[in-house]
Image (tube, coloured by chain):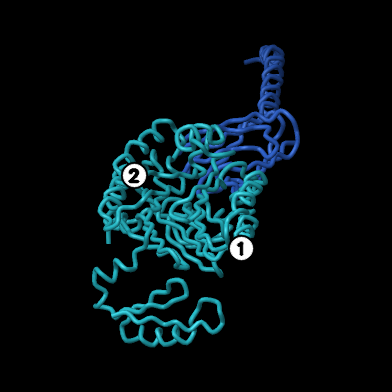
Amino acid sequence: MADYILHDHNHDGIDRRGFLKCMAWAGTGALCVLQGGVLKSFALGQLDEHSKASLKGELSFVQISDSHIGFNKPANPDVIGTLQAAVAKINVLPTPPAFVLHTGDLTHLSKPEEFDRLDQVLKSVKTGRVFFVPGEHDVLNDDGKQYRECFGKGSLGEGWYSFDQKGVHFIGLVNVVNLKAGGLGNLGHEQLEWLEKDVKRLKSSTPIVVFAHIPLWAVYPDWGWGTDDGAQALSYLKRFGSVTVLNGHIHQTMQKVEGNVTFHTAMSTAFPQPQPGTAASPGPMKVPAEQLRTLLGITDVDYVPGKHSLAITDSPLAI
Amino acid sequence: MNNRRLASMILVLLPVLVVLIFLGHKKAQAGTAAAAPGVIKIDNFSFTPATLTVPVGTTITWTNSDDIPHTVVSDDKTFKSKVLDTDEKFSYTFTKPGTYSYFCSVHPKMTAKIVVQ
């Protein structure tokens, strides 16, 4: 049973009275879903397949990240196996994704055979196409030349590009090249100029999805988890009603909402990393073997036309 | 033995002793000039020691003991290693005095320096 709340007194798309009412319901076991400023509530237990389907949108895609093909240390001696498990998970999603976004660190050491192996494994994904952005592990020897030859065809500069799907504008950014001593991720002047021009012609109602390897917001600068000029990129997207930023690099999920922008990082398909500040360094985190796959996973994203936010669901490889 | 024999022995041995001492001193001097090699360990996303002071002519060897690859790149590009996986090494001989700040180009928050005197 669904109940719509539609009072927008502040004209900001948020129904505050309805929100409070819904929160009271939540205490009694209702599920509230905010979509486009409209609150829909479902009594838990009544959330059947039909209701779930109505939460699904017109565009579905998947984000995977940090496959690190070539890594073979104790944290995960079989990164191919866990990547294959991620592919299997994608292939049983109720709605097959239109495409997959890989947010970087495809390989561990930028070796040709590592790129090749990844390519082979991803051929089994039941989807239209896989889009990539590089991680710092993909540009180790040649500033990304090999990466761009294999996975960056049609891209500009270090590998950035944009495309449109079902009215959503997707932007792939590269923030792992020309890193400065003591610095964080870096987009650079040329790429920022391109980005500003790229979105200039778009209507503010166009939903935007930006994907890049290193988080565009300051998750934990001490560990290099941020982008020095990320704020400038976001300033070009300020006027848009719905912006979703998808990143990887930190090998764990993290989400932040700031105004119209939803930031989200994905799990790795290779190995987990510690939470900010909980270890000496952000290296691979060893966990008991039976726990590994609960900390690796994929991210399913659904867009419903006219809705404000994309529905983002993280799924571990095992529970 | 009698005094005369003792005196002749000393006369013979003394120059030999002097020569040996002289050679030993020279060897010690030569050892200092060539300099003991410098050693830097890379582990837990850091260079240890963070600051290393060495004489001109020292060869420093970095060893990556971390379970993640790193690089050794000087800020002014004087030296630049290829990517080092676990247990791989990089060496550089410092022939000019100065302060060399360097970092890992993959994880740029990792910084350190060599002072060559």
Q: Nearer the viewer, residue B35 or A128?
A: A128
Labels 1 & 2 near each other (Cβ < 8 A): no
| Chain for numbered disc 1 | A
What tint does the image give chain B?
A: blue
| Residue drawn at 57 percent across, 47 percent down | A175
Q: Is residue A52 visible?
A: yes
Up-down relation of residue A141 to residue A283 (above or below): above
Q: Is residue B3 visible?
A: no
Q: Answer with left or right where residue A160 lies relative to residue A31.
A: right
| Residue drawn at 24 percent across, 78 percent down | A45
What tint does the image give chain A?
A: cyan
| Residue drawn at 27 percent across, 62 percent down | A319
Q: Which residue is mark 2?
A: A79
Q: Which residue is mark 1?
A: A238
The picture places residue B40, in percent across and down from the top left corner, at 57, 40
Q: Nearer the viewer, residue A163 or A47?
A: A163
Up-down relation of residue B37 to residue A99 (above or below): above
Type of residue at label 2? Val
The picture places residue A69, in percent across and down from the top left corner, at 38, 40
| Residue drawn at 30 percent across, 58 percent down | A291
Type of residue at label 1? Lys
Q: Nearer the viewer, residue A153 or A250?
A: A153
The picture places residue A107, in percent across and down from the top left corner, at 43, 40
Q: Answer with left or right where residue A295 lies relative to residue A230.
A: left
Distance of label 1 from label 2 (alpha carbons): 38 Å
The picture places residue B39, in percent across and down from the top left corner, at 58, 37
Which sits earlier in the primary sequence, circle 1 or circle 2?
Answer: 2
